[in-house]
Image: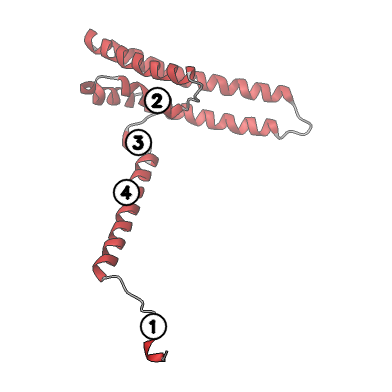
Amino acid sequence: MSAEFDPVPVRRRSPIWMRALLIASLAVNVAVIGVVTGYKMKDGEDTHALSRQVSWIVRMVPDHRKEFALTHFAGFREQLIASRMAQMGDLDRILAAVRTDPFEAQELRVALEVRRASSDSRRVIVHEGLVTLLEQFEQEERLTFANNLEARLEKVRLNQNSGGTISTSAAAQ
C-alpha cells in the first residue's frame, strides 16, 4: 500500500455551540452549588436564627405566626448573645484546666460545672421566651404548635428506635 491510502487520524472538533453549552452547564452547576452552600452557611442574623433552639421552636409555630415568633425572640437577642459570649469564655477556662501540668482534675471539674451553668442559663432564656410566646397564642395556635412538636418528636423517636444516630440539625427539622 502506498502512503496516499494510509488513513490519517483526523481530530474532529466539536461544534462551538456544543462547547458553549458545556461551559454554560458547568457554570450553572457551580452557581447552584454556591447558592446552596451560601444558604447553609448564611449568618443567623439574616435568617433570624437567634439560636438553634429558637429556630427549632419557630418551625413548630403555625405559619401565620412565624414572623410574630421571630420578632418575639428578637427581644431576647442581647441576652442570648451575652450568654454565648460567657460560654466561649468558659471554653477557654476548660482548655486552660486541661493543659495544667501537673493535671488538676478538680480545676477541670469546676470549669465544666461553670460551663454547665452557662449552658443552663441560656436554656432558661429560650424556655422563658417559649412560655411568653405561647401565652400570646390562641388555643388553636397552641394546639397547632403541640401537634407540630409531637410530629417532630415522633420522627426523632422512630430514628432512635431504628438505631439511627440523631444529629442536632436532624432533630431540628
In this rendering, the answer to whether 73 lies above or below 92 is above
Q: Secondary structure at mark 4?
A: helix
Percent x, y for residue 118? 53, 22
- The tag earlier along the polypeptide, 1 or 4, is 1
Percent x, y for residue 136? 26, 13
Hey, what amino acid is under mark 2?
A: Ala
Depth check, mark 2 against mark 3: the one in front is 2
Closer to the camera in the image, 146 or 170: 170
- The tag earlier along the polypeptide, 4 or 2, is 4
Image disc number at residue 63: none
Q: Quadrant of residue 127?
A: top left
Residue of label 2: 172
Which residue is at 37% across, 29% downward? 50
Quadrant (top left/top right/bottom left/bottom right) for the N terminus:
bottom left
Labelled pair 2, 3 in contact (Cβ < 8 Å): no
Percent x, y for residue 96? 67, 33
Hey, what amino acid is under mark 1?
A: Val
Residue of label 3: 45
- The tag earlier along the polypeptide, 3 or 4, is 4
